[in-house]
Amino acid sequence: MNLARAIHFDDSDTRVFHNPARTGEWCISGGFEFSNWSEGDLTGKARQAFSNGWLGLETFGRVSFVAVTQVQPGEIEALTDALAAHFVAIYGAPSLEAARGVAAEEMRQMADLCDGHAPNTLLTVARELGESGVHESFRVIEAEAAGLDQFAIHGNLDDDTPHTH
């Protein structure tokens, strides 16, 4: 099974998000955070988090890019439990038991999004606020799989002709 981890190519996330996710932490879309938002909420760094931020499941910070990576079943359980606890602590869910089903559904949606993509495939999220609520769309940036023949060019000591292996 695949999920996605936060990835950074530079330090821009530290400037555009109030709370940037940590490199390598597991992430989900996290669009639920914006379910009650209106245009008035979409200013500054909050707007950036809304527009294109994935939600880290350790720091509950935001990140612009995630990379598809294999996850172990035990990790899924721990992440689901952490997300359920977040729902209780931050969103007022009545209990861990009540929140766990919603957390499990968030994890399943992220696993479905990552399913079928090669490791290191990058994903981005874009959100818009419309009359019917928050709309999310996702972009897939396939990992560049360079052929080994581009790197494995060897010379033969007996002649000057390079050989590809």
Image (cartoon, rainbow, N blue to C red):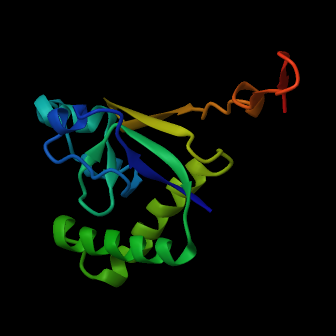
Residue, far front: 158
Q: Nearer the viewer, residue 131 or 57?
A: 57
- In the rendered image, which quarter contains the N terminus? bottom right
Image quadrant where residue 153 sits: top right
> Which residue is rendered at x = 32% and y = 73% of the image?
82
Looking at the picture, does residue 70 appear above or below residue 156?
Answer: below
Residue, far right: 158
> Which residue is rendered at x = 49% and y = 71% of the image?
76
Image quadrant where residue 91 sits: bottom left
Image quadrant where residue 127 sits: top left
Report x, y in % for residue 58.
29, 63
- Asked whether, in this view, residue 84 is left or right of residue 139, the answer is left
> Which residue is rendered at x = 24% and y = 36% of the image?
13
Number of numbered discs overlaid on the protein picture: 0
Residue, far top: 160
Report x, y in % for residue 126.
39, 31
Report x, y in % for residue 14.
18, 39
Q: Nearer the viewer, residue 75 or 150?
A: 150
- In the rendered image, which quarter contains the C terminus? top right
Looking at the picture, does residue 55 appear above or below residue 9?
Answer: below
Report x, y in % for residue 49.
24, 38
- Asked whether, in this view, residue 139 is left or right of residue 54, the answer is right
